[in-house]
Amino acid sequence: MDLTVRATPRLAGETTVPGDKSITHRALLFGAMGDGPSRIWDHLEGGDCRATMACLERLGIVVERVAEAEIIVHGRGLRGWRPPAAPLDCGRSGTTMRLLAGLLAGQSFPSVLTGDAQLLGRPMGRVVEPLRRMGARIRATEENSPPLEIDGGSLQGVRYELPVASAQVKSCVLLAGLYAQGPTVVVEPAPSRDHTERMLRARGAPLESRGFEHTLAGPVERLSALDIRVPGDLSSAAYLLVAALLAREGRLVVRGVSVNPTRTGLLSVLNRMGARMTLQNLRSEGGEPVADLSAEPSTLRAAEVGGDLVPRMIDEFPILALAATQAEGVTRVRDAAELRVKESDRISAIVGELSALGAHIQERPDGFNVHGPTPLHGGPVHSHGDHRLAMTLAVAGLVASGSTRVQHAECVADSYPGFERVLGDLAPGALEGG
Ligand code: S3P
């Protein structure tokens, strides 16, 4: 599917965004590990989270659909999952594969994790290595890629220092730690999203966090079932907020968005860039801070981004790059080499696609430089099969003169089903045929 977006000066209205992807994955997994049923409201029904649901169903978990925004996961406890009859298909979802790898390493049965061609090209050594140190028998390809063949068995607690800040790796090791003899200690180089830690504690797991160090006292016998309402995904709201900042008229309000401080790096950077944004009605839902966000047309200036800020906005660099094309000065992104192993090589992909629209952006090994402001012109661009690229390029289409055709935009539904409809409602006339 191609998505064609026309230059549109006005973006206005109020909306919500689908449930947070990271929290939905974890709500499903923790539901499956819980003792008895856990109800989940407002989960994300995107491709990645569906992959997690489908894997859990193959492991004997019943996921009951009560209503469009309500499901019940019938947990079978930490040790009641059934051996899968076939390889578990994680689709394009790295979170599904890396978190399940930790959980399956501790089971008493063998399993295989596989996925789409895109996922088969992503690095898994980062989870294979610590799991092997814990005693797991796990095989990957010679390049340390999937499929992962896991012979579940007994695990030992370890102290593991993460070479890169990654919530997926941290979560994988902590989840394996539930089954390990003795304490499992994970040390992060910088704080990454902490949804796993919040959910472990809320369900009664003996987890202590001191600064960048997390200690889980294993083995854990049971996790309690817990109902949860999933807040809106800030990583999805980011596209709409930046679209509103770059518009010439209008005002956008996005209600009920997760503003967990381990996720709000983009908001901090945009504030520094001079964005007119507000955060209101701060409250707590499902153990996570939630707020309503607003954004208005703004004159932006360049910013420098690096260090500990990077993991706090790891999925927001494509949309930051677009904002930077309209900001006065040189925006420099450093310490972000991890972007090269996401759903695409996000450094080279965003540099290539925004350059095709007229941006002045240069690739660096660990980031990019953007010189702004630069008028963009519409044209054909490619999503690289990466949902975050596709949505960034669709927002670029609102700013670029003429029309912008985003090729292979169907991947948007991996994290934000309905994105095109919302964009068309907020910016009438933007979508071809809309
Ligand atoms: C995620 C962690 C991040 C992020 C991904 C979701 C998670 O990946 O990019 O979209 O839910 O734990 P890394 O752990 O590889 O940084």
Image: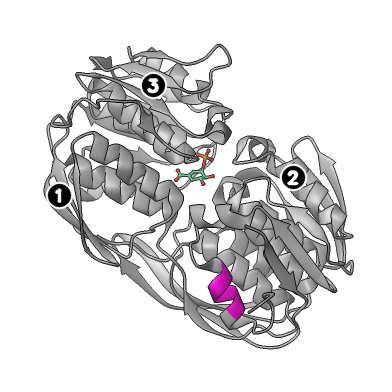
Mark 1 to mark 3: distance in Å?
Answer: 28 Å
- What residue is drawn where x is 25% and y is 22%? 106
Q: Main secondary structure of the magenta part?
A: helix
How far across and down, in percent of the image, does residue 86 sit? 30, 25
Q: Is mark 2 within 8 Å of ligand 1?
A: no
Q: Nearer the viewer, residue 224 or 6?
A: 6
- As drawn, is 155 to the left or to the right of 330? left
Q: Which mark is residue 225?
A: 1
Q: Which mark is residue 194?
A: none
Mark 2 to mark 3: distance in Å?
Answer: 36 Å
Is residue 422 in the magenta section?
yes
Q: Which residues are magenta?
A: 420-424
Query: How many callouts does the rendering have?
Result: 3
Mark positioned earlier in the residue sequence (2 or 3): 3
Q: Is residue 351 above or below residue 82?
A: below
Mark 2 to mark 1: distance in Å?
Answer: 42 Å
- As drawn, is 170 to the left or to the right of 123? left
Q: Nearer the viewer, residue 160 or 253?
A: 253
Q: Secondary structure at mark 3?
A: strand
Taking the image as drawn, is residue 212 in sight? no
Mark positioned earlier in the residue sequence (1 or 3): 3
- What residue is drawn where x is 43% and y is 55%? 46
Mark 2 vs mark 1: give the one in front. Answer: 2
Q: Is residue 413 above or below residue 351?
A: below
Q: Amino acid at mark 2?
A: Ala
Disc 2 to disc 1: CB gap under 8 Å = no
How far across and down, in percent of the image, does residue 123 sit? 56, 26
Q: Which residue is mark 2?
A: 349
Q: Is residue 66 above or below residue 180?
A: below
Q: Is residue 134 above or below residue 320?
A: above
Q: Which residue is mark 3?
A: 159
